[in-house]
C-alpha cells in the first residue's frame, strides 16, 4: 500500500490523535482533504476542522468507510467496544493501526474479521512537538509494505523503528514512560542553577536546551554516548567532578530500574 492518494482516518482525537493529525498534515504525506477524524467531543473535532481543514464527524463508521488507513487512537479500555461497532465496515483492503497502550495484536485481530491487516504502534507524548519515539509491530496478516507505510506515518512526528511485538513492553518502559523520567532531570538541573544564582526561567531554558542538544548530538553524529561524555570531560575539570557525584548517587542504576519497573508494569497491565 502506497500512501500516495490514500485517505487516513482517526478514531479518537485526544492529545495523541490530534498530534498525529497535525504531524501528518504538516509533513504533507496526505493532504488535509484526505484526513478524516471522529470523536465524541465536538470541541476537539471543531478545532481540527477550523485549524487544519480536515474532515470531521462523530460517526466512527463514516471514518472507516471513507479511509484506507484507520488509526485507532482511543483509550485501551474502550478499544474493544469501538472495534465491535466498526467491525462490519472493515474490508480486507483496509489497514488498521492501533496506538492503544498494552493491547496486544492478537486481542485486536480476534475482534475483527480474519485476515484484517493490523499494525500496533507505541508512540510517546513528544508526538505533540513532532519529536516522538515510536515503535511499530506488524500483525499476523499485515504485509511488510503495511509496516513501511506505518513507519512513514509515524516518522512525520519524530523517529520510528520496527520491533517484534514481544518487545513492546520494553518500548513502553523506555520511550513510552521515558519523557516522565527526563522532566524531573531537567527540573533538578534547573534547581542546581537556581541554587547557584540563576533565575528560574533562565535555568529551565538552559537545562532543557542542554538535554535537547545532547540527544540531538548523539543521534546526528551516531556516536556512542560514552564517547561524547569523554569529549566534554577534561582531566581534573568541572565536568568530571559532577559526573563523580552522579555516579556516587547511583544515577545509572536508578534509570535502569525505572525503565525495568515500567516495563514490568506494562507486562502486568497486558495480562
Image: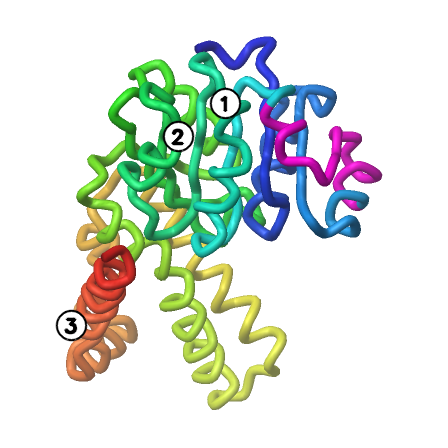
| Element at label 1 | loop
Q: Tell which circle, 1 or 2, labels the residue nearer the N-terminal end.
A: 1
Task: Give the numbered dot on residue 238.
Answer: none
Closer mark to the observer between disc 3 and disc 1? 1
Q: Tell which circle, 3 or 1, labels the residue nearer the N-terminal end.
A: 1
The alpha-carbon separation of the residues under discs 1 and 2 comes to 8 Å
Q: Where is the C terminus found, in terms of image quarters?
A: bottom left
Residue drawn at 52 percent across, 48 percent down: 74
| Element at label 2 | loop
Q: Viewer-proximal residue, 44 or 271?
A: 271
Residue 234 visible? The answer is no
| Residue 34, horizontal then vertical, whole percent | 68, 20
Residue 179 shown left or right of residue 71 in the figure: left
The span picked out in magenta is: 47-64
Residue drawn at 23 percent across, 39 percent down: 165
Q: Which residue is mark 3?
A: 253
Residue 142 visible? The answer is yes
Q: Which residue is mark 1?
A: 90
Residue 204 against residue 90 in the figure, above or below:
below
| Element at label 3 | helix
Q: Which residue is mark 2?
A: 112
Amino acid at each position: 500500500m502506497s500512501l500516495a492518494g490514500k485517505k487516513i482516518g482517526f478514531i479518537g482525537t485526544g492529545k495523541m490523535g490530534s498530534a498525529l493529525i497535525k504531524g501528518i498534515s504538516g509533513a504533507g504525506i496526505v493532504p488535509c482533504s484526505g484526513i478524516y477524524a471522529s470523536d465524541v467531543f465536538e470541541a476537539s473535532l471543531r478545532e481540527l476542522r477550523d485549524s487544519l481543514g480536515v474532515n470531521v464527524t462523530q460517526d466512527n463508521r463514516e471514518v472507516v468507510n471513507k479511509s484506507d488507513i484507520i488509526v485507532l487512537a482511543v483509550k485501551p479500555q474502550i478499544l474493544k467496544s469501538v472495534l465491535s461497532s466498526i467491525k462490519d465496515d472493515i474490508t480486507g483492503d483496509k489497514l488498521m493501526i492501533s496506538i492503544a497502550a498494552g493491547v496486544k495484536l492478537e486481542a485486536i485481530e480476534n475482534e475483527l474479521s480474519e485476515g484484517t491487516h493490523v499494525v500496533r504502534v507505541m508512540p510517546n507524548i513528544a508526538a505533540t512537538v513532532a519529536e516522538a519515539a515510536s515503535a511499530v509491530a506488524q500483525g499476523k496478516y499485515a504485509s511488510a509494505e503495511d509496516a513501511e507505510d506505518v513507519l512513514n506515518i509515524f516518522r512525520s512526528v519524530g523517529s520510528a523503528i520496527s520491533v517484534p511485538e514481544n518487545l513492546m513492553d520494553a518500548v513502553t518502559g523506555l520511550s513510552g514512560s521515558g519523557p516522565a523520567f527526563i522532566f524531573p532531570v531537567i527540573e533538578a538541573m534547573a534547581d542546581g542553577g537556581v541554587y547557584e544564582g540563576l533565575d528560574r526561567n533562565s535555568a529551565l531554558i538552559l537545562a532543557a536546551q542542554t538535554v535537547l542538544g545532547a540527544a540531538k548530538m548523539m543521534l546526528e553524529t551516531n556516536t556512542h554516548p560514552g564517547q561524547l561524555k569523554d569529549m566534554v570531560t577534561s582531566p581534573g575539570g568541572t565536568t568530571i567532578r559532577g559526573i563523580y557525584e552522579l555516579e556516587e548517587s547511583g544515577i545509572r542504576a536508578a534509570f535502569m530500574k525505572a525503565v525495568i519497573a515500567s516495563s514490568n508494569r506494562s507486562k502486568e497491565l497486558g495480562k
